[in-house]
Amino acid sequence: MTTPRQSQSEQRFAGDPDPDDPLIGARLRFCLSQVEQQLCEALAAAGFADIQVAHFKVFRFPPPENERPIDLAQRAGMSKQAMNYLLVQLEEAGYLVRHSIDGASARVVSLTEKGWRVAELQRATVRAIEQQWEARVGRARFQTFYAVLKDLTDAA
């Protein structure tokens, strides 16, 4: 049975060999959503239920160590104001501190011990997800998948 959406896809994407098949961007977003969901579950189970998906932009690799908020914002692809909003939340919850280095007027961001526990748990959780995916598709296929991702991201 063809749904109205499918018939629109067939009309709009004429010439595409499979207009109803998601492209790589959609598939990568789906994988990211799975990772984010498992991260939220692991963090909540460990007592960090106040960490939200939006906060992952601050905790992403490499975690902030003496980084300026503007640099974090650029790395996350967001405005300085939006990043500042996240930083205030995380600072108030005790995950990070803002401080000046050598008396400079510019303040930088670093994780607290509590913040490092979150970063460590996130990394361990993602490693576990990688192991789940490897078990699902096989070691050789997963290693190829990871190598291709590495090539694509190292070239960026």
Image: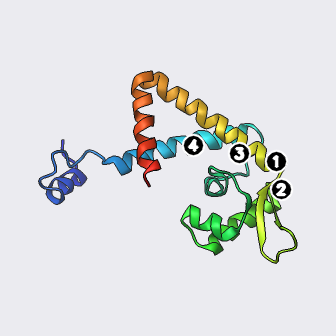
42 sits to left or right of 133:
right
At mark 4, the secondary structure is helix
Name the disc covering residue 37, or none: 4
Give the mark nearer the N terminus: 3 vs 2: 2
Residue 101 x, y percent position in the rendering: 83, 67
Label 3 to label 2: alpha-carbon separation: 13 Å
Q: Is residue 138 visible?
A: no
Give the mark nearer the N terminus: 2 vs 1: 2
Identify residue for label 1. Answer: 114
Identify residue for label 3. Answer: 119
Label 2 to label 1: alpha-carbon separation: 7 Å
Count neighbours of disc 4 (C-alpha within 10 A) and say few if under 14, some if 14 to 19, many if 20 or more: few
At mark 2, the secondary structure is loop
From the viewer's perspective, is residue 142 above or below residue 93? above
Count neighbours of disc 3 (C-alpha within 10 A) and say few if under 14, some if 14 to 19, many if 20 or more: many
Label 3 to label 1: alpha-carbon separation: 9 Å
Which image quarter holds the N terminus? Answer: top left
Q: Nearer the viewer, mark 2 or mark 4?
A: 2
Q: Is residue 82 visible?
A: yes
Label 2 to label 4: alpha-carbon separation: 23 Å
From the viewer's perspective, is residue 122 above or below residue 107? above
Count neighbours of disc 2 (C-alpha within 10 A) and say few if under 14, some if 14 to 19, many if 20 or more: some
At mark 3, the secondary structure is helix
- Amino acid bearing label 1: Lys
Residue 135 x, y percent position in the rendering: 48, 22
Q: Nearer the viewer, mark 4 or mark 3?
A: 3
- Amino acid bearing label 3: Ala
Give the mark nearer the N terminus: 3 vs 1: 1
* Rendered residue at 64%/44% (across/down): 40
Name the disc covering residue 94, or none: 2
* Rendered residue at 18%/56% (across/down): 13
